[in-house]
Amino acid sequence: MTILLQFLILLMVIQHASFATQEGGLTLADCYALSLKQSETIAIQKELIEEAEGRFLRALSVVLPHASFSSSDKRQDGSGGSAFTLKEVPERKFVLNQNLFSGFKEIAAMASVRAEKKQRTHEKTRAEQLLLVDVANAFYLLLEQHEDLETLGTTRTTLLERMEELKEREKLGRSRPSEVVSAEAQLRRVEAEIERVRSQKVIARQLLEFLTGRDPIEEITDSEPSLPSLETEEKHLTKAGKRPDVQAAEEAWRAAQKKVSVARGALFPTVALEGNYYVERAGAAEDVNWDVALKVDAPIFQGGDHAGAMKEATARERQAKLQYQKAERAASLDIRDATARLKAAVARSAALEKAMKASEEDYRFQVEDYRLSLVNNLDVLQALQALQEARREYLHATYEAKRLYWQLRIATGETL
């Protein structure tokens, strides 16, 4: 196999390298779906939503009537001669309690818990989005290490072929022994780099297996080899307010506002209705089958307890408002930073692609000139090394742009 043929193989690897060529390779969407099922963080967020639903039911129960059955048997030191001196006083009754007014605390509490549930739902959505960043980083890192390993492997094969040609030329007196040694030295450096990249590929694979719960992951494939066209920064910034973490902070602020109303409601009197229906009674009230009582409890002085609760709730409401404003500004900053990094990465990738193509031409010319004895072996080896470095830099820049693309998508609150 000639060096020119090896060079053509290198070009084919550059243009068509892919981790998975067979059907069934996991795509980014597949890995993300697996990670959603595997993630303990998402499961915890689901439980927090269930917890908020439980608090809502508890708040609702205060508004609804409470019914119960009460049974008691009283024994006393009596003579039993009258209804007031019975030795045994049994009582069986149905009890109904209904809260009529308590300063609208229950309504405010339900509204607060409803806002908290929305907050937890938005937090769960944001956790799912951030998980996509981790999956995309691991996914494209594994693809990058695989293609990097293929590039180094092709370079190694080319160097081995070149050493064979140099040895043949040495026998004919057309090459010096030092040229073979130089090629071998470069070959050993490439082999050492192959081992380093191979270990990084194993680490990247283990990370993706950890996120997805799939062990082992045999093949993955990039279903979107090229990046879509980018929108303007201004259009991205319009999505900052709709990001789930910003919406969660807004709902937390609303919940804090309602808790102020709950604390304020403690200043109002409470009115409750209590009714009893007796199944069994003894003594003087034996003939009384039911009774109803209207209870009014008006707070007068509680030693500053209500004032302290109001002050505490108001301070927390202001904190929640500031957190919401901070979340809005942080979202806008994330979008600006992600947009700037992605634009720079795309521009760098385009420049490195041109540099790679120029290195391809340079290597091809160096090989042809060497056969015409116009250049020496060192020039060819330097051109091959430059091509290898250009190819690897282009790979790194391309996959860095893909990772940054998903970071921008998540910064704007978008997913797959």
Image (spheres, rainbow, N blue to C red):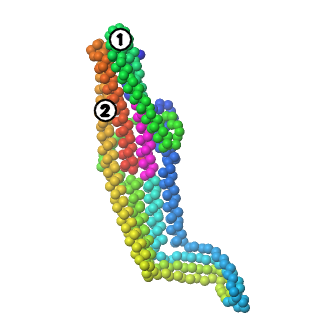
Q: Is residue 26 above or below residue 270?
A: above
User: Is residue 235 visible to us here?
Assistant: no
Pick whichever of labels 2 and 1 is earlier in the sequence.
1
Residue 328: image location, x then y, percent: 34, 56
Per the rendering, the mark at residue 170 is 1
> What secondary structure prevails in the magenta region?
helix
Residue furthest to the top in view is 172
Determine the secondary structure under disc 1. Answer: helix
**Relative horizontal placement of residue 280, taking residue 343 as reference (left or right):** right
Residue 115: image location, x then y, percent: 44, 62
**Amino acid at the residue labelled 1:** Glu
Q: Is residue 162 above or below residue 102?
A: above
Q: Quadrant of the C terminus?
A: top left
Q: CA distance from mark 2 to mark 1?
A: 37 Å
The residue at 36%/63% (across/down) is 319
Task: Magenta stretch: give its range.
Answer: 126-148
Closest to the observer, 154 or 278: 154
The residue at 52%/43% (across/down) is 213
Q: Dot 2 corresponds to which residue?
A: 352
